[in-house]
Image (cartoon, rainbow, N blue to C red):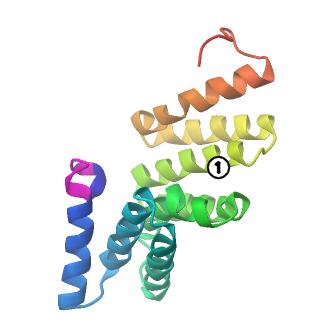
Amino acid sequence: TCMCCSHDMGPLLALRIIQLSISHGVCESTAFGFAAYSALLSRIGDVHNAYKYGNFALDIMRRMPTREKYCRVSFFLFSGVFLRSNRMHSCLDTVLEAHREGLKAGDVSYATLCAVRYCLIAFWCKKKLASVKQDLIDFGKEAKVYRQESVWNLVYPLEQAILNLMGHAEWPNLL
């Protein structure tokens, strides 16, 4: 996957998946390829086409009998593409569902990334800080059970910001 290769190779991988899908037909990885391509378009500022290809990826995913890639596709789409084109509140439930589907499919790395994304979006949506902090605690325990502490470390700045805003930080100058 794109997580296992350099940043330079990620776009090439996505384009290769799309190319193979056009040549040989649609498979469960096709939606992932289009989601990664959509994220690339979003990153370079082409929000309109990113949204279009993102919806295409979702459409492909919905038509597939397997849900193994659902978590990965959702992570790519809700890490940037749909956050730029949809209301953030509308993304929360979908990201949480992707987290759950990832755990069911055994894709614990991307499920944990979806949990991280969920907590960030909840914070950005001005969800109550105590609620986001509780989500961090719950997802953190889950990440530990699945040995995903290295992925979960991505939330430490968010956790510190929440503690600072709540006045509970041991070192309030730390962020």
Closer to us: 129 or 99? 129
Which residues, given as a range, are shown in magenta?
A: 4-10
Task: Look at the image and tell me in which quarter the N terminus lies.
Answer: bottom left
When asked about the image quadrant of residue 85, the answer is: bottom right
Question: What residue do we see at 49% from left, 64% from top?
Answer: 77
Say how many tags the image has.
1
Residue 135 position in % (x across, y down)? 68, 41
Circle 1 sits on which residue? 121
Closer to us: 12 or 3? 12
| Magenta-colored stretch includes residue 7 | yes
Residue 17 position in % (x across, y down)? 24, 74
Closer to us: 92 or 9? 9
Residue type at tag 1: Ile
Please determine whether, in this image, residue 98 is positioned above or below residue 56. Answer: above
Question: What residue do we see at 78% from left, 45% from top?
Answer: 127
Residue 147 position in % (x across, y down)? 41, 38
When asked about the image quadrant of residue 39, the answer is: bottom left
